[in-house]
Image: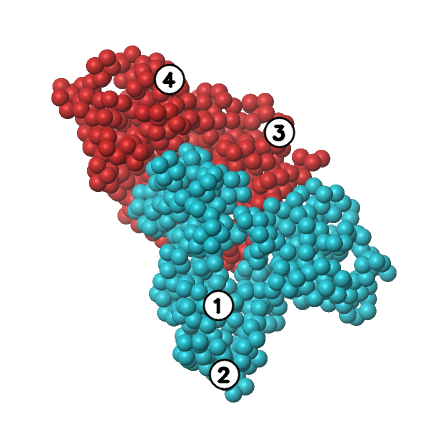
Chain colours: A red, B cyan
């Protein structure tokens, strides 16, 4: 029987990070990554297949870099795992023995039990290349696309499908337009705004405005009741009674952890929370760890169970799990929620809580905001005159628990400053008086660097 | 006699930040900013007047925003300050009484006592609009420009002068070429590399390569011995005996604090260190504070006196000084040194110590490095496949003391993550397992986010 010192089931973010970490920390261990897809798409890159990359094959994580490091890859579906004998059995009846096992089996799109869900041209955004290719083929002929769900995946898919149909966006210089196509895209969101689970309401409105400028219709406060069609979807009916013409529907309303294998293995797992792990990312079985979308998580800020499933969380967890295999050295401090996206001509990023989610948690906050150009002077190339930052500090201890940025491409790394600040519990006072690198071509003026300014505004409020 | 509650002498970064801070914290106080230049250029924007903005007037800090906040501005040279009577006397014999005084009088370019320094067409890079206009006029006719000094100001001036002469650079889409001009630019640097006081040697080499691609000659390990010419400079002679044709010379070899006024006032000041202040940015006179380039500073990392004169330090100090005027609430923690620049097609940023400066200080370090694309997948627009990060951690306590990034425009804010990490003493372990926002259009893959990867490499070294 073939054996591995460490077997990793799952070849996406958590699994690959776990494999890389094992190989670094225990270079003599034999590591096998097992996956059930022919190739692994870059998960966050999936929407960009359609409007920018124009090719499913351009959004694949290349195996070679992992093979070169001595990580083996097996492309086979796992049938079962015998924990007592420590043997993985595949669907072709082959087997693999293991000493330590990491489950990074991910999540799958949530498909609501809704009339019409099985009609042709109703697509989830899954992580199988063949499925993504089918979606691409169908999109090329679609005239009316309805996207159900206005979270990150829904908004990004809507933007890219519109771009596929010729809508202008900031990377128009680099993207080529599909000849002759024209598509009407509509986003249906249950909440009052798109992106609302992560972003400040005012930035959600900005994102919706960007979608609007691209010709995308955004319908909020609405739910899809049913889809109808003669074999193929043709109409989407909303709970308001409105009907939308639709020859293609994309569903992006969240993901649910893959727990079937873990349940078969007799490991504790919950359909919503995922496979139960402790802070070392260890399951009930001391030789089995889980990380990423399939693993249970708690919020860094509230300590409560959370459904934050992000590649950044998966990577952190994969690294922690792998580091702990032979000796517990690292604990997870919980999922933070650090997001970034690009919608039309603006970028949006967020870390931690929003004003709404803080209120929902009953946490009193002091807010500091700033608006300034992202270049200095304002005539420098690439200037967005109204780049914005909004920081939330706990009223009781003054520590930052949320950070939001809207504007240029630096939004992502500006929010990473805030993500680090949240993870380390910095105060407004500290963030206000820190020294930040600035440059005319790259950032706001040092007089108006957004984080400094927003923090100083909050620091002043906290002294009142 | 006119009076102000708070008088600020100096209208650039430190002075303006001080005025803004007083106005926020003490809105009822009458604040006057006094300056000796007609208008205040954006200090960091000065090089970009020449290659991008093409107009000195486009690089001016607009007064209106400050006037609108109720901050008065006086454009007059100060003749003297009577500290016992708390009266400022101007060169036109007018006076202004004050209760609290902040000195933000800045620095001036260091002009070496060198043969030929007074020849025509030998320019310092000062902060007077009229002088900058003269330089612009002279550059339009220059064919051979020698830049003495390969620090930030020298490298940026060289790049922009070359661009003025038609050299291509990444913002070529936005900039217009001066018709028919053509200029040969040479940088002379005393140290083995340009930018070496702030950046890692390998990144200095990258920056020099970028300059080379723009047709700029970089001569290192050389000093200028003299300049010659018949009234106007025509030749620069180096200590190696080499001679360079030069119809225009730009000197950018550092700045010295303006201490003349402080000395006249009887305040303790040193020609190199500047006006002596305590950690509250307070001078010997309890009612007088100093901030920015003119004020003495110590290094955040070593605690020793330092010559780090940056707008970001000035802004932090201006804010601290102003906050302390009526009650000491904030201390400076020392100058960190957080830099960013753009050279040709790459950006470079640094915070804290370099490998060399750490060695000079006798600090043993563990280094973690990472190279990865700044987009994911690599086919996304704006991808720089070899963006790099290099982090330095103290061997004794594991805390980060230096961070360096080379690559795309995010370099500045990625270094700001590291600047915050340095200021808060984060470890490699902490930076490795943190969660960072990533996005295909904006950052590296979460599997290869540069800071995480470099920190994990260092964390692993530290466990050995």
Residue A132 visible in rendering:
no
**Residue depicted at x 41% and y 68%:** B221
Q: What subunit carries mark 3?
A: A
Crowd band around label 3 with a 10 angstrom C-alpha radius: few (<14), some (14–19), many (20+): few
Label located before the other in sequence (3 or 4): 4
In the rendering, which numbered label is found on residue A397?
Answer: 3
Q: What subunit carries mark 1?
A: B
Q: Nearer the viewer, residue A343 or B139?
A: B139
User: Would residue A312 appear left or right of A403 to someone viewing this image?
Assistant: left
| Location of mark 4 (residue) | A276
Mark 4 or 1: the one toward you: 1
- Mark 3 → mark 4, Cα distance in angstroms: 32 Å
Q: Do pointers 1 and 2 mark residues of a single chain?
A: yes
Q: What subunit carries mark 2?
A: B
Q: Do pointers 4 and 1 mark residues of a single chain?
A: no
- Mark 1 → mark 3, Cα distance in angstroms: 48 Å
Q: Element under label 2? A: strand
- B87, above or below A406, in the image: below
């Amino acid at each position: 029987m073939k054996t591995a010192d460490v077997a990793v089931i799952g070849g996406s973010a958590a699994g690959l990070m776990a494999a890389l970490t094992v190989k670094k920390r225990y270079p003599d261990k034999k590591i096998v990554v097992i996956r059930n897809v022919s190739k692994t798409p870059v998960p966050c890159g999936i929407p960009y297949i359609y409007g920018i990359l124009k090719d499913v094959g351009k959004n694949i994580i290349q195996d070679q870099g992992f093979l070169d490091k001595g990580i083996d890859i097996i492309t086979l579906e796992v049938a079962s795992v015998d924990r007592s004998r420590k043997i993985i059995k595949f669907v072709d009846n082959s087997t693999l023995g293991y000493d330590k096992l990491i489950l990074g089996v991910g999540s799958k799109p949530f498909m609501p039990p809704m009339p019409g869900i099985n009609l042709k041209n109703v697509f989830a955004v899954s992580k199988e290349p063949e499925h993504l290719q089918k979606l691409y083929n169908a999109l090329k002929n679609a005239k009316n696309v309805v996207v159900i769900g206005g979270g990150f995946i829904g908004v990004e898919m809507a933007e890219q499908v519109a771009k596929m149909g010729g809508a202008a966006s900031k990377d128009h210089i680099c993207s080529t337009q599909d000849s002759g196509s024209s598509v009407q895209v509509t986003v249906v969101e249950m909440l009052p705004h798109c992106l609302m689970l992560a972003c400040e309401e005012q930035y959600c409105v900005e994102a919706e405005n960007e979608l609007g400028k691209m010709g995308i219709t955004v319908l909020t406060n609405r739910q899809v009741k049913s889809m109808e069609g003669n074999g193929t979807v043709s109409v989407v009916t909303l709970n308001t009674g409105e009907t939308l013409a639709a020859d293609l529907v994309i569903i992006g309303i969240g993901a649910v952890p893959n727990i079937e294998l873990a349940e078969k293995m007799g490991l504790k797992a919950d359909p919503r929370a995922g496979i139960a792990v402790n802070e070392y990312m260890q399951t009930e079985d001391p030789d089995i760890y889980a990380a990423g979308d399939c693993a249970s998580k708690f919020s860094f800020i509230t300590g409560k169970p959370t459904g934050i499933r992000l590649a950044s969380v998966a990577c952190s967890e994969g690294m922690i799990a792998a580091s702990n295999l032979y000796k517990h050295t690292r604990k997870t401090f919980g999922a933070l929620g650090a997001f970034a996206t690009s919608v039309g001509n603006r970028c949006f990023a967020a870390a931690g809580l929003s004003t709404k989610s803080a209120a929902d948690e009953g946490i009193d906050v002091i807010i500091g905001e700033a608006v300034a150009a992202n270049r200095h002077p304002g005539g420098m190339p690439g200037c967005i005159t109204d780049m914005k930052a909004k920081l939330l500090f706990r009223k009781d201890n003054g520590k930052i628990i949320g950070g939001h940025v809207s504007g240029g491409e630096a939004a992502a790394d500006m929010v990473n400053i805030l993500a680090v600040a949240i993870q380390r519990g910095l105060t407004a006072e500290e963030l206000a008086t820190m020294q930040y690198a600035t440059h005319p071509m790259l950032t706001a003026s040092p007089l108006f660097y957004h984080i400094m300014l927003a923090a100083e505004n909050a620091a002043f409020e906290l002294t009142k």
